[in-house]
Amino acid sequence: MTDRAAHTHGLSAFVVDKGTKGFRAGKKEDKLGLRASDTAELIFEDCVLPAENLLGTEGQGFVDAMRVLDGGRISIAALSLGMAEGAYDAALNYSKERRQFGKSISDFQAIQWKLADMATEIDAAMLLTMRAASMKDAGMKTTQESSMAKLYASEVAVKCANEGVQIHGGYGFIKDYPAEKFYRDVKLCTIGEGTSEIQRLVIARQLLKD
């Protein structure tokens, strides 16, 4: 906070190098999923930074962070899409291999409908994500489109992971199969870069601002 009177326009961003006096990493979190990506707290105690560590323009830290979120939400949408596709592919392959009552479970309508819904929603999520990414590449503002892609793709991914476990049955609950890992990993996509609830607020504000 470089200017308290300016509120959000009084926030500035700084680069803090590892080894800076007063700055250290704290506890590494023991996470539900995405455990290959470390998450830890950052601790600042009497940490003094030189002016040359200013990142961007003074007072524009919050504004810049919001711009970064627009792009970050496209990344989370893409991450969601990849995990949704992984969960779907695992479920599709398993349904063809698993046999019950003398035939593959993919022959049962209940399984077919799950697979059809998963494939359709993944395609819709992909199109929303590609639209936002294409607009970003063209230098266009993507606040609404990024939030739509992130909201839909992340919730589709959670649904696909859930249905993937269901299609695997009991095997979906054990670590010998990938379904349980998708189930654990995917939930963060509805939380990171702004929760689903925040995405709905962002979208609504964009729709109502004119």
Image (spheres, rainbow, N blue to C red):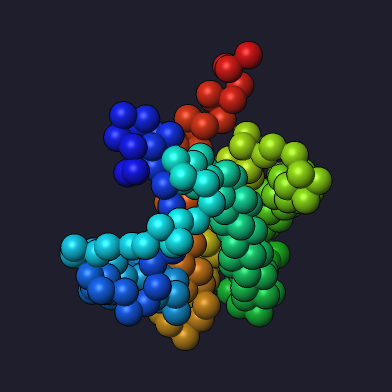
* In front of the other: 40 or 186: 40
Quadrant the C terminus occupies: top right
Residue in the picture at 44% in, 75% down:
37
* In front of the other: 123 or 62: 62
Extreme residue in the top direction:
210
Relative to 209, say whether 43 is above or below: below
Q: Position of residue 89 (x, y in %)?
A: 67, 70
Residue in the picture at 76% in, 44% down:
139
The image quadrant that residue 14 belongs to is bottom left
Residue in the picture at 34% in, 37% down:
3
Extreme residue in the bottom direction:
176
- 71 left or right of 42? right
Q: Position of residue 149 (x, y in %)?
A: 63, 45
Quadrant the N terminus occupies: top left
* In front of the other: 57 or 109: 57
Visible residue check, residue 63: yes
- 179 left or right of 92? left
Visible residue check, residue 69: no
Relative to 80, say whether 73 is above or below: above
* In front of the other: 88 or 187: 187
Number of marks drawn: 0
Extreme residue in the front direction:
51
Q: Position of residue 101 (x, y in %)?
A: 60, 72
Q: Position of residue 56 (x, y in %)?
A: 53, 51
